[in-house]
Amino acid sequence: MELSSYISVDCVIFGYDGEKLNVLLVKRTLSEESNHLNFEPDWTLTGNHVYQDETIETAANRILFEITGLSDIFLEQFKTFADPQRLLKPKDQNWLKSIGRNPAIRVATIGFFALVATQKVALKWMGREVKWVPVKEVGTLGFDHNQILEEALIAIRQKMKHEPIGFELLPSKFTLTQLQNVYEQIFDAELDKRNFRRKVSRMKYVIPLNEKQKGVPHKPARLYMFSREVFDITNQELFDFIV
Amino acid sequence: MELSSYISVDCVIFGYDGEKLNVLLVKRTLSEESNHLNFEPDWTLTGNHVYQDETIETAANRILFEITGLSDIFLEQFKTFADPQRLLKPKDQNWLKSIGRNPAIRVATIGFFALVATQKVALKWMGREVKWVPVKEVGTLGFDHNQILEEALIAIRQKMKHEPIGFELLPSKFTLTQLQNVYEQIFDAELDKRNFRRKVSRMKYVIPLNEKQKGVPHKPARLYMFSREVFDITNQELFDFIV
DNA sequence: ATATCTTAGTGTCAGTACAACACTAAGTAA
DNA sequence: TTACTTAGTGTTGTACTGACACTAAGATAT
């Protein structure tokens, strides 16, 4: 009657390539011997089971480390997906069988989103091909991963309204145009340049450097950095609400 | 190596008694025959295991229905707690044994918060005593439930900034003073009466009725209602952010 | 060297929301 | 009739917002 099940984590890994917001996907194919099933390869988010003695955060960080080689990545749990139907589509069942899992066992997965400032990732992860895809161009994913991605986007937008996390997608020195573009991509909205800069200039933790962009074929922009210290000191919790 | 575990839900049920924000707790005692362990009774949140074929939302709603008799309660998942250590305190282990569970099995629990507009709840749930406790007066709870409660409060405050959920704690007709008090309790802040009322008056979905409070020994206040319909139509997504 | 191209960077004005603040009005109870 | 309690209201100064267009700086091409 009560539920014994597997627990997994799925990481929705976001990156920014200077132009668009991307999400990291891994290819899903059948192993050679199972391929009589005529399985059309597709893509999924990066997920894995949680080991017996590790926390879910550790499991998520493990995935991130394996793919990026980095271990201090911004990472946050956003929602858990545990519908008993979530892995029952025939294609998903076939794939689970092919990798030797019992496809009848329910799997609850905890969704995490991660923001990474690098584009450099492993070419393969667990033997599976890895690629960045612009969020707006993601097609049909395996399992319930389209739903998980949608929820991750909602969570990240929500988070972004209250926490200075846009910087997590940028190198430590960045231009205001880059920063603005990150916000535009994530909120899927155009922002006014002057108003944006005025707003940023009030936030003392975005600090101008005496340094300029190099190697651009036009007027080079000033570089800025984000100071977590200054943020922690000066930030007085934007307190507004609707009723 | 991989984790086979139980999945449970814990509901942080909030209520408002006209004065304070309360949370519903259930008493934890040992059954007669186990009581040689000298177990000091304490309190926990309302939680239960998820059945094999039900969704976690169904499991959470089941708890709410059993306790309140209501089935359309505001309910939302906020965080999952799956630390392998979370149930390993001796007291928790003893209790788990006493009710016949294998205390070595890891339990991941999905935290939900619920807002109920009634104070009327079952006196007992699953044979356990039930009571409302003001959130600020909650002592040490069983398991990791203090942590879960803390996170629930953070989540509800966050949610409240963007969604009109204060009404879920009030009867369908309410006064502005009651509404203001709900916000003050949850945000743990004092609000200016005139400024609050000006703000509410801009929100067209808080609708004044031609009806007044009855039975109060002072000037009776006008009653208002919340219209979800009007909210859905008029609400243009308060869009502000920090960088 | 000059012209062209591209992005960087800046200020004003009108409108809206905010915080801070104190008194009168309406009903009940004694 | 008086006392008590909570309801209900308006103004002013300040801060932020959205809308909006031009000059500056550097690289490249001729």
Image (cartoon, coloured by chain):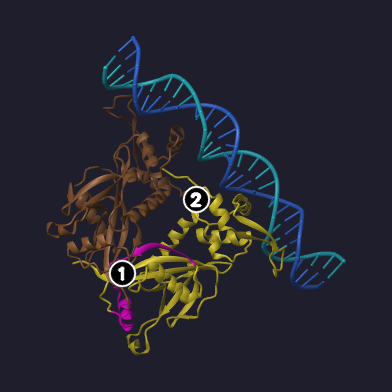
Chain colours: A yellow, B brown, C cyan, D blue
Left or right: C16, with B223 as reference point: right
Q: Is residue A228 magenta?
A: no
Helix, strand or loop for disc 1: loop
Q: Is residue A96 magenta?
A: yes
Q: Residue at x 26, y 27 (%)?
A: B215
In the image, is residue A47 above or below residue A185? below
Of residues A96 and B101, the one drawn nearer to the viewer in this rendering:
B101
Left or right: A81, with A23 as reference point: left
**Can residue A136 be seen in the rendering of this structure?**
no
In the rendered image, residue A31, in percent from the top left (x then y), is placed at 37, 86
In the image, is residue A130 above or below residue A169? below
Q: Are marks 2 and 1 on the same chain?
A: no
**Circle 2 sits on which residue?**
B239
In the rendered image, residue B87, in percent from the top left (x then y), is placed at 29, 63
Chain identifier of the residue bearing label 2 in the image = B
Snapshot quadrant of residue A223? bottom right
In the rendered image, residue B166, in percent from the top left (x then y), is placed at 36, 44
In the image, is residue B160 above or below residue C29? below
At label 2, counting other C-alpha atoms closer than 10 Å, the crowd grade (few under 14, some 14-19, many 20 or more) is few
Helix, strand or loop for disc 2: loop
Of residues A11 and B202, the one drawn nearer to the viewer in this rendering:
A11
User: Type of residue at label 2?
Assistant: Phe
- Magenta stretch, residue numbers: A73-101
Q: Residue at x 41, y 78 (%)?
A: A42
Q: Residue furthest left?
A: B33
**Circle 1 sits on which residue?**
A86
User: Type of residue at label 1?
Assistant: Arg
Left or right: A240, with A182 as reference point: left
Chain identifier of the residue bearing label 1 in the image = A
Of residues D25 and A209, the one drawn nearer to the viewer in this rendering:
A209
- Residues under labels 2 and 1: Cα distance? 33 Å
